[in-house]
Image: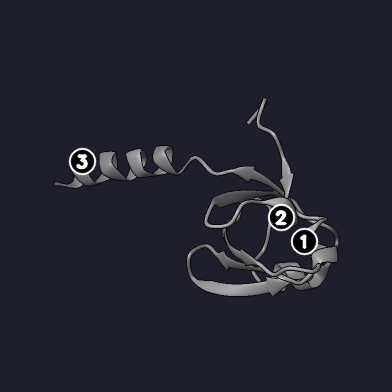
Amino acid sequence: MDGCQKINLYDACKRNTFKVASIPDIGLLENLGIRVGTHIEVQTRYGLGGPVLLRVEGAYSVALGKDIAKQIELLRADVSADAADTDELLEAVI
């Protein structure tokens, strides 16, 4: 993933999918399923310094405050590559 630009969760664009690159040492995040390598979708960011609502691995939604969200670094997920891998796997099975 060299050359990929990192962005913090709070500044990430809505309705986009990202891969978690780094997280702060806060045990709650791992309990919520947010770990390095996890795919998340930013659903919305509330104004005036409010929380960020995200979807973790397409399974459930979590809201994180601005202070924590600013400490989580993300990389843009290559969804098209994941889809291509899935298509190849389906063709091999059929």
- The N terminus - image quarter: top right
Q: Earlier in the sequence, mark 3 or mark 2?
A: 2
Q: Residue at x 69, y 70 (%)?
A: 46
Which label sits on residue 92? 3
User: Residue 61: x and y, percent?
Assistant: 57, 74
CA–CA distance between discs 3 and 1?
40 Å
Q: Within 10 Å of the Cα at label 3, are there few (<14), some (14-19), or many (20+) other Cα atoms?
A: few
Q: Residue at x 72, y 44 (%)?
A: 7
Q: Nearer the viewer, mark 3 or mark 2?
A: 2
Q: Residue at x 42, y 37 (%)?
A: 81
Residue 65 found in image quarter: bottom right
Count of residue discs: 3
Q: Earlier in the sequence, mark 3 or mark 1?
A: 1
Give the vertical position of 22 relative to 3 (above or below).
below
Q: Nearer the viewer, mark 3 or mark 1?
A: 1
CA–CA distance between discs 3 and 2?
37 Å
The amino acid pointed to by label 3 is Ala
The amino acid pointed to by label 1 is Ala
Residue 30 relative to residue 94: left or right = right
Which label sits on residue 9? 2
Mark 1 residue element: helix
Q: Residue at x 19, y 41 (%)?
A: 91
Residue under label 1, please give it. Answer: 69
